[in-house]
Amino acid sequence: MKYFLKVSFLRNIFVVSTFISALSLVLLFFVFPHVVSLITSNSEVEAARVLFFCQAGFSALALIFLLVLISLLIKADKNFRRKEEIEDALKKENADLVMQIHDRTEKFMEINDQLKQEISERNLEEERLRKAQQYIENLIESSIDMIISVDQDRNIVEFNSAAQKIFGYEKKEVLGKSIEMLYADPDQFVDTKALFKKRGSFNVEIMNKRKNGEVFPSLVSASVLKDRDENTIGVMGISRDISEEKRIKRELIESKEMAEEASKAKAEFLANMSHEIRTPLNGIIGMTELMMCQELDRDQSDLIQTISQEANFLNHIINNVLDFSKIEAGKLEFEKSLLI
């Protein structure tokens, strides 16, 4: 299309220039001589001279006009070629731009897909972290033991439901405050702080104080609390109210003491009763031995012998009872003897 327009434009210029040149020649050689002859009819020489100069001038003008037209045609041709070169360069640059845009678009789509995948993975990771955090919070809140954590300044940052129930404080009443408020003895707070600095953890029994001022014993296990980068961020303690255990232990000790006293009384009773029983029993055994030395008939001898055997058997039982009472009292003595 552009080539057709270029050819049409050049052709039109050429036709116009040819028409103008032909018209000039006609005017010079046919029309103008008649005009000159009419003007200068008195002198043919003068007329010929004027005609010559006029024809020469018009020929020169026509030639110049043709040269100008030719130069314009050449320049127009150069401009068209330059325009075509520029258009070709623009087409090439446009094609390169289209290719670059296509490549950039594909790269952008790849990056976009990667970003979508990373965002999706990050969302999944955040969801896992949220569920893990919620699970940990549920563990802390559902624990029957008191879980209390503090920062490096010993200010409370976590106070679970069990701690709220046992101490009587709500979480908002203790968060940001020193844990010293939960100690019944300020000196014990200082001691546990020094012990923790020395060992890094501890497992001790302390006396705590409720909101209403009541003092109760608790067993505390505390350790360092660190973040993912192993930086110390505070201390976490797990404690349990051992008032009931203390009461049961005290009752067990009292029961043990009562049992020991009862056992001691039983041992003394058995010792006394054994001694009291053994005295008449020894008399019976002695008298039966004396009677066996007398002249007796067969039936009397059998009776006396039976009494002696039963008395010795009863004496043996009493000795065993005394031995058991000595064992319970821890007073059993062993004798060394030679076995043959």
Image: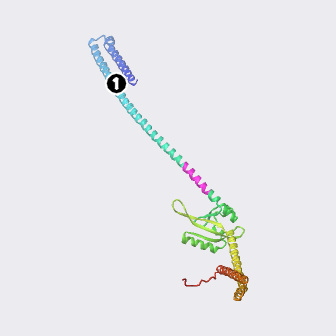
Where residue 77 appears, as percent x and y from the top left, is 34, 26
| Figure check: 327 above or below 156 | below
The one of 206 and 91 positioned closer to us in this rendering: 206
Span shown in magenta: 123-137
230 or 336, nearer to the observer: 336
Res. 153 visible in picture:
no
Q: Which colour scheme is used?
A: rainbow
Q: Measured from the top left, where is residue 324 in percent x and y?
A: 66, 79
Q: Is residue 234 left or right of residue 33?
A: right
Label 1 secondary element:
helix
Q: In this view, does 52 lie above or below 174?
A: above
- Residue indicated by mark 1: 73
Task: State which quarter of the image contains the N terminus.
Answer: top left
User: Which secondary structure is most common in the magenta stretch?
Assistant: helix
> Callout 1: 10 Å neighbours few (<14), some, many (20+)?
some
Placement of 337 over or under 162, stated as above or below: below
Q: Where is residue 198 in the image (x, y as percent from the top left)?
A: 54, 72
Q: Residue drawn 63% across and 56% down?
A: 138
Q: Is residue 135 above or below residue 46?
A: below
Q: Quadrant of residue 87?
A: top left
Name of the residue lying farthest toward the front: 297
Whether residue 127 appears in magenta in the rendering, the answer is yes
Q: Which residue is drawn at 62% across and 68% down?
A: 220
- Residue 192 part of the magenta segment: no
* Residue in the picture at 41% in, 34% down: 95
Q: What's the residue at 56%, 51% (across, down)?
A: 128
Outermost residue toward the left?
Answer: 45
What amino acid type is highlighted by mark number 1? Leu
Which of the two residues, 262 or 297, is positioned nearer the viewer here? 297
